[in-house]
């Protein structure tokens, strides 16, 4: 068990503990937010035929500028069986198959029809104009969604357009949340001077649910070993047991002793991170355990940096860590101590602007924050305009 672990190493070690959960095959329509468990390959080309991109008339380009004789119609879902010969045109609608032999569509705004005769009223279109060529979106056998990519709304549409009705995904991770603290009161309860509302559980549950996992908020347990141990034991069947609070080394910080009493093995207990130094991770039978600090901002930041990537990895994400957005700083920032810092801030005029107050209990500013600005352990002071790594909160 190491002492104060560098952030990147701690994240890598946590993710190394996690293996993707079993695969299930579900309807593509139900797969939103999951991660593809295998490459999704096109079973058809799209479009499957040359289609018109406009309402108009399909002709042979060599016959322009016309006039043309209209010999039939091709509408979406029902094509035109014949093919236009010299100076012949086929009425065509958006999404309809271009008849054999035609190679250009004249949009209807650029021509005039009189009975069966069609005359151009504008410059002739270029060859191939307003035709979506067969396979121009994707061809059969093309890779549509790579294994480990998220099933975004567009990926759902793409998989379905590629001929898939079902898709293999990893099952949803099941997360147990346990809040610890004698001072914690239920949301909405009247609080005495020694109490505070237990806000972390619902906050982290909401963050975790954004990954599509199932969250069991097991509520609050007091600061005594048996209660915490009992809650951890009761959570054994989950994929991740996530505790909040009681993670440091004070007399009332009993999460580590409780984990050990439940026969968990801990991989690390402290990370060189601000906020969020006391942070434990390990394994308890088939579950992973993650002990986060109780200060609301620390809990938020460590959930963002550790719990969310862990859940994404369990659910099969190829890139479980949050993407980095480099931005120029909107203000100078001081040198950094021996812990990597994440500073709450916002984006203003394309620049990352740190908030002045970085109190790790201040929720009003957390709710206003749009980004976390990353400053590495040991970094020098930097002037405004320096490019820094940021993480977007949303
Ligand atoms: P701890 O990590 O248990 O020492 O808690 C650090 C600070 O966070 C204390 O001020 C706690 O009252 C507060 N805290 C702990 N758990 C929660 C929670 N679930 N919701 C809100 N605040 C909490
Ligand atoms: Mg506590």
Image (cartoon, grey):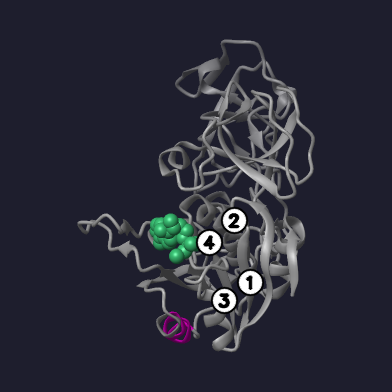
Residue 293 is tagged as 4
- Check residue 120 in the rendering and tell me which mark sits there, or answer none: none
Residues under labels 1 and 3: Cα distance?
10 Å
Q: Badge 3 is on which residue?
A: 256
How far, Cα to Cα, is label 3 from label 4? 12 Å
Q: Position of residue 154 (x, y in %)?
A: 56, 49
Q: Nearer the viewer, residue 100 or 20?
A: 20
Q: Are marks 3 and 2 in contact (CB under 8 Å)?
A: no
Residue in the picture at 74% in, 75% down: 1
Q: Which residues are magenta?
A: 228-235
Please provide percent x and percent y for residue 109: 51, 18
Seen at 59% across and 89% down, the residue is: 263
Q: Is residue 385 above or below residue 258?
A: above
Percent position of residue 297, x then y: 50, 50
Q: Is residue 210 visible?
A: yes
Sequence-wise, the earlier of marks 2 and 1 is 2
Residue at the disc numbered 2:
276
- Outermost left residue: 190
Q: Which class describes the residues within 10 Å of circle 1: few (<14), some (14-19), or many (20+)? A: many
Whether the residue under disc 4 has CB within 8 Å of ligand 1: yes
Q: Nearer the viewer, mark 4 or mark 1?
A: 4
Q: Is residue 204 visible?
A: no
How far is the residue under mark 3 from the one under mark 2? 15 Å
User: Which of 12 and 376 lies nearest the eye of the viewer?
Assistant: 376
């Amino acid at each position: 068990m190491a002492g104060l672990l560098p952030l990147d190493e701690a994240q890598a070690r946590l993710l190394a503990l996690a293996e993707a959960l079993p695969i299930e095959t579900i309807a593509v329509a139900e797969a939103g937010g999951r991660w593809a468990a295998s490459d999704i390959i096109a079973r058809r080309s799209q479009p499957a035929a040359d289609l018109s991109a406009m309402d108009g008339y399909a002709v042979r380009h060599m016959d322009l500028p016309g006039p043309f004789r209209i010999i039939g119609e091709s509408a979406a879902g029902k094509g035109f069986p014949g093919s236009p010969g010299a100076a012949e045109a086929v009425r065509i609608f958006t999404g309809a198959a271009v008849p054999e032999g035609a190679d250009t569509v004249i949009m209807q705004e650029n021509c005039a029809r009189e009975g069966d005769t069609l005359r151009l009223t504008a410059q002739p279109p270029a060859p191939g104009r307003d035709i979506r060529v067969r396979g121009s979106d994707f061809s059969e056998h093309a890779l549509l969604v790579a294994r480990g990519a998220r099933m975004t709304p567009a990926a759902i549409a793409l998989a379905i357009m590629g001929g898939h009705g079902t898709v293999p995904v990893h099952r949803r991770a099941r997360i147990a949340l346990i809040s610890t603290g004698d001072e914690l009161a239920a949301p909405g309860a009247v609080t005495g001077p020694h109490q505070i509302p237990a806000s972390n559980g619902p906050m982290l549950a909401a963050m975790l649910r954004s990954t599509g996992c199932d969250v069991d908020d097991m509520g609050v347990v007091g600061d005594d070993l048996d209660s915490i141990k009992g809650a951890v034991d009761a959570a054994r069947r989950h994929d991740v047991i996530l505790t909040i609070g009681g993670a440091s080394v004070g007399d009332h910080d009993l999460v580590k002793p409780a984990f050990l009493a439940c026969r968990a093995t801990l991989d690390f207990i402290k990370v060189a991170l601000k906020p969020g130094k006391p942070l434990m991770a390990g394994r308890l039978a088939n579950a992973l355990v993650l002990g986060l600090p109780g200060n609301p901002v620390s809990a938020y930041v460590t959930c963002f940096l550790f719990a969310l990537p862990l859940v994404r990895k369990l659910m099969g994400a190829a890139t479980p860590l949050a993407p980095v957005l480099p931005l120029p700083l909107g203000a100078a920032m001081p040198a950094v101590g021996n812990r990597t810092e994440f500073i709450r801030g916002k984006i203003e005029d394309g620049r990352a602007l740190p908030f002045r107050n970085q109190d790790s209990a201040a929720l009003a500013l957390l709710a206003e924050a749009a980004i976390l600005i990353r400053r590495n352990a040991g970094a020098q002071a930097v002037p405004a305009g320096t490019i820094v790594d940021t993480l977007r909160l949303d």
